[in-house]
Image (cartoon, rainbow, N blue to C red):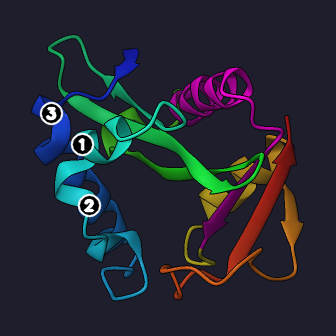
């Protein structure tokens, strides 16, 4: 497995991965990334500014089996976005590797903190964030489009 930057050729695979993971968690509903308007064209969304990046985890045949991104949030706070791993790649450290790539990018881009939103249905993700040094917040930093999310975390870089 290798990590590389998202390309336009990956857009359909990443969108399918995100939607399948959310569907498996019963989160294929409004207020989640499932319905994000940019989901089918993430490469264009992340290419809009050098303050954004999305990384994909690919197998030996260059098939997307995971992904995670960084986007602007507010000031020097970035948002860790759309961390999803295909079932075949779980339990092998893929999430940690993708988060490390995103954190390194965020530091280089000048961010000092990473914020993220998740849902109580995603218990493995919550444990991952806590284990990786993210602190739970009592509420979102600001109202956003993902109104179904009910767990909020931040990490100092």
Dot 1 corresponds to which residue?
A: 44
Of tags 3 and 1, which is closer to the observer? 1
Q: Quadrant of residue 85?
A: top left
- Residue at position x 35%, y 88% in the image: 30
As drawn, 140 above or below 91: below
- Asked whether disc 1 touches disc 2, contact meaning CB atoms under 8 Å apart, the reply is yes
Give the class, few, some or many, for how many residues have Cα within 10 Å of label 3's Cα (few <14, many ≥20): few
Specify whether residue 107 is painted magenta.
yes
**Residue range of the region highlighted in magenta in the rendering:** 93-118
Dot 3 corresponds to which residue?
A: 8
- Asked whether disc 3 touches disc 2, contact meaning CB atoms under 8 Å apart, the reply is no
Q: CA distance from mark 3 to mark 1?
A: 7 Å
Of the image marks 3 and 2, the number of the one nearer the N terminus: 3
* Left or right of 121 in this view: 137: right
Disc on res. 112? none
Give the class, few, some or many, for how many residues have Cα within 10 Å of label 2's Cα (few <14, many ≥20): some
Q: Secondary structure at mark 2?
A: loop
Dot 2 corresponds to which residue?
A: 38
Q: Quadrant of residue 18?
A: bottom left
């Amino acid at each position: 497995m290798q990590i590389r930057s998202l390309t336009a050729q990956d857009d359909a695979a990443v969108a399918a991965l995100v939607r399948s993971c959310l569907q498996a968690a019963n989160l294929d509903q409004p207020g989640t990334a499932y319905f994000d308007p940019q989901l089918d064209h993430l490469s264009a969304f992340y290419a809009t500014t050098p303050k954004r990046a999305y990384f994909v985890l690919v197998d030996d045949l260059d098939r997307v089996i995971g992904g995670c991104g960084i986007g602007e949030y507010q000031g020097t706070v970035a948002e860790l976005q759309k961390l999803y791993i295909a079932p075949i790649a779980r339990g092998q450290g893929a999430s940690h590797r993708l988060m490390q790539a995103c954190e390194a990018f965020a530091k280089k881009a000048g961010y000092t903190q990473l914020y993220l939103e998740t849902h109580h249905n995603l218990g493995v993700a919550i444990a991952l964030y806590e284990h990786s040094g993210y602190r739970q917040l009592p509420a979102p930093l600001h109202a956003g489009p993902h109104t179904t999310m009910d767990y909020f975390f931040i990490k100092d870089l």
